[in-house]
C-alpha cells in the first residue's frame, strides 16, 4: 500500500481498557447491541469491528436537535445511553463516537479517542470540532468514525498513510499533512479533505470543552439551525433546516425545499429519529420563519 512522506507518531498512547474517566462500566451493552441490530460475536476482531461500525451507521442518525432547541449536550455515558439507545434519538460526533468507543472497549478492543479539525475542502485552521477513534485489533490499527455524518466512513479504514476504503460507490483515503492525518473522500475525480488530526492522548475534559463550544457558541456550525445527516451505500442525505440535499452514487445531487411539517416528518421517518410531541412542536417553531423564541412547554 502506498505511503506518503511525513513525520508521524508511532504510538497512539491508548487509554487502558476500563479507564473510569470514560464511564464504560455504566453502559448497558446488550441494549446498545439491540438498538443497532448487531447479533454477531462479541469478540475483539476486525470482522466484529466492521460489522458493528456499519450497524451503528445504519441505525443511529447524525443530528443536532438538542443544540437547535438550545439545550445542553451531555457526554456522560448514562446520558448518551438514554438518548441514543433508550429514546431512539441520534446525536453528533462527540456523542456518537464516545458512545461507540465504550462499546468497543467493553468488547475488548483498545481505543484511542482523537479530536480533529474539520476541513471540508479547505485548509483553514478551525477549532477541534470532531471526534474520531483509532482502534487496535491485534497488530493492526483502524480509523473508525461513526459520527461524521453523511460523508463519513461506512466502514473503518486502515490507520496508515495512503490507505483507501471503498464501499459501494463511495471512496475514502487516509493521507497526511505534516504531522497530521487527513481523512479524504472522493468527489468526482478529486480528493476532498474531510478532517485532520494529530495523534495524541486526550482526556474526557478535552472533549467536554470542545463539545460545550460546539453546542453553545454563536460561531459554531451547529448552533442556530437544525442539522441531520445520514449516509448509506445508497445515498448521502443532509438536511439543514428545511433544505434536503441528496447525493447519489452516480454523482447526481438533488435539492429539495420542505415545509416545517415536512421537515419534521422527514426527521421522524426517513431519518428514523424518535421525537416526542414536545420536541416536534418546538422543531416546527424553529423551522417556521420568522423564527420565534423557543419556549419549553410547561
Image (cartoon, rainbow, N blue to C red):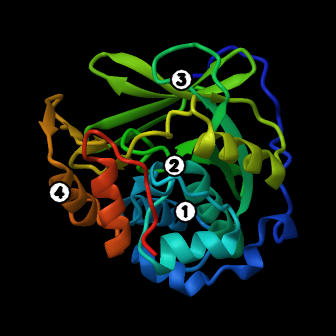
With respect to residue 2, does 144 lie above or below?
below
Task: Give the distance between the C-alpha atoms of the residues marked 2 and 4, in whole angstroms.
Answer: 36 Å
Q: Name the residue under label 4.
A: 261
Quarter occupied by residue 59:
bottom left
> Whole-percent x and y of residue 89?
43, 68
Relative to 248, 130 lies left or right: right
Q: Name the residue under label 1.
A: 49
Say how many tags the image has. Answer: 4
Judge the density around disc 3: few (<14), some (14-19), many (≥20) Cα neighbours within 10 Å: some
Q: Under tag 1, what secondary structure?
A: helix
Q: Under tag 3, what secondary structure?
A: loop
Relative to 280, 133 lies left or right: right
Q: Residue at x 30, y 42 (%)?
A: 241
- Quarter of the figure with the N terminus: top right
Q: Do the residues labelled 1 and 2 touch (CB within 8 Å)?
A: yes
Task: Give the camera-side residue of 246 and 297.
Answer: 297
Mark nearer the N terminus (1 vs 4)? 1
Task: Give the distance between the C-alpha atoms of the residues marked 1 and 2, in whole angstroms.
Answer: 8 Å
Judge the density around disc 2: few (<14), some (14-19), many (≥20) Cα neighbours within 10 Å: many
**Res. 19 in view:** no
Amino acid at each position: 500500500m502506498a505511503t506518503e512522506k511525513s513525520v508521524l507518531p508511532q504510538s497512539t498512547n491508548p487509554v487502558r481498557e476500563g479507564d473510569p474517566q470514560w464511564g464504560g462500566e455504566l453502559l448497558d451493552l446488550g441494549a446498545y447491541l439491540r438498538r443497532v441490530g448487531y447479533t454477531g460475536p462479541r469478540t475483539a476482531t476486525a470482522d466484529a469491528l466492521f460489522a458493528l461500525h456499519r450497524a451503528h451507521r445504519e441505525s443511529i442518525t447524525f443530528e443536532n436537535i438538542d443544540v437547535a432547541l438550545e439545550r445542553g449536550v451531555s457526554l456522560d455515558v448514562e446520558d448518551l445511553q438514554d438518548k441514543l439507545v433508550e429514546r431512539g434519538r441520534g446525536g453528533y460526533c462527540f456523542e456518537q463516537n464516545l458512545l461507540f468507543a465504550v462499546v468497543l472497549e467493553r468488547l475488548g478492543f483498545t481505543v484511542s479517542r482523537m479530536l480533529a479539525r474539520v476541513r471540508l475542502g479547505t485548509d483553514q485552521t478551525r477549532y477541534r470540532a470532531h471526534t474520531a477513534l483509532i482502534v487496535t485489533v491485534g497488530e493492526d490499527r483502524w480509523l473508525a468514525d461513526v459520527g461524521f455524518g453523511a460523508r463519513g466512513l461506512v466502514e473503518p479504514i486502515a490507520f496508515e498513510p495512503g490507505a483507501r476504503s471503498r464501499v459501494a460507490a463511495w471512496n475514502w483515503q487516509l493521507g497526511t499533512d505534516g504531522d497530521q492525518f487527513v481523512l479524504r473522500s472522493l468527489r468526482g475525480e478529486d480528493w476532498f479533505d474531510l478532517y485532520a488530526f494529530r495523534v495524541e492522548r486526550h482526556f474526557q475534559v478535552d472533549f467536554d470543552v470542545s463539545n460545550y463550544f460546539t453546542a453553545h457558541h454563536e460561531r459554531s456550525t451547529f448552533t442556530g439551525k437544525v442539522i441531520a445527516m445520514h449516509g448509506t451505500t445508497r445515498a448521502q442525505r443532509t438536511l439543514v433546516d428545511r433544505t434536503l440535499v441528496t447525493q447519489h452514487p452516480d454523482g447526481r445531487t438533488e435539492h429539495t425545499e420542505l415545509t416545517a411539517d415536512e421537515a419534521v416528518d422527514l426527521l421522524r421517518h426517513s431519518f428514523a429519529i424518535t421525537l416526542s410531541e414536545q420536541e416536534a412542536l418546538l422543531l416546527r417553531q424553529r423551522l417556521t420563519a420568522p423564527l420565534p423564541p423557543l419556549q419549553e412547554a410547561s
